Image: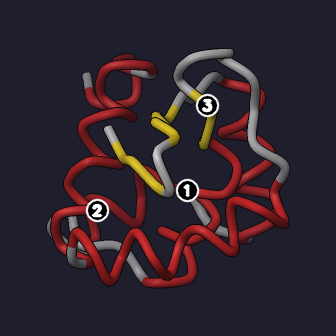
Amino acid sequence: MFEVDGVNYTLKFNKQKLKTIELTAKTSVIGEITKNNGILQYSLLEQLFSFGLVEEKTNEAVKQKKALELFDGVVEENGLISLNMAIIEKLQDDLGFMFR
């Protein structure tokens, strides 16, 4: 999904991560998606990215501090809208119940 310094990363979400993100953001992720026609606030994208980032090869979660450091570079390289769409697509894949 993303490559930074030769390391491939992807996003993975589950119900527990979703609960943590919503507690931290103090908002409903699906509520924000529907309210804003799929365009999420920068800070919510940052949280989704930092909680969901895993290294593809090892399938290990990236520590949140490192993920936050990578976020800006990924936004610069891929664009905010592209990253926004990638996160929403991954949410649909991993947590499809949210979109039914």
Dot 1 and dot 2 residues touching (CB under 8 Å): yes
The mark nearer the N terminus, 3 or 2, is 3
Residue 52 lies, with reference to residue 36, above or below; the image says above
Residue assigned mark 3 = 55
Name above or below for residue 8 compared with residue 86: above
State whether residue 72 is above or below residue 62. below
Return the residue at label 2.
83
Q: How many other residues sit within 10 Å of disc 3, few (<14), some (14-19) or many (≥20)?
A: some
Amino acid type at mark 3 = Glu
Q: Secondary structure at mark 3?
A: strand
How far apart marks 3 and 2 lie (CA) works out to 17 Å
How far apart marks 3 and 1 lie (CA) works out to 12 Å
Front one among 13 and 78? 78
For the point 40% across and 66% down, which residue is it? Answer: 32
List x then y, in percent, for residue 90. Answer: 34, 33
Mark 1 residue crowding within 10 angstroms, few (<14) / some (14–19) / many (20+): many
* Secondary structure state at the residue bearing disc 2: helix
Q: Which residue is mark 1?
A: 49
Disc on the earlier residue, 1 or 2 = 1
**Quarter of the image containing the N terminus?**
top left
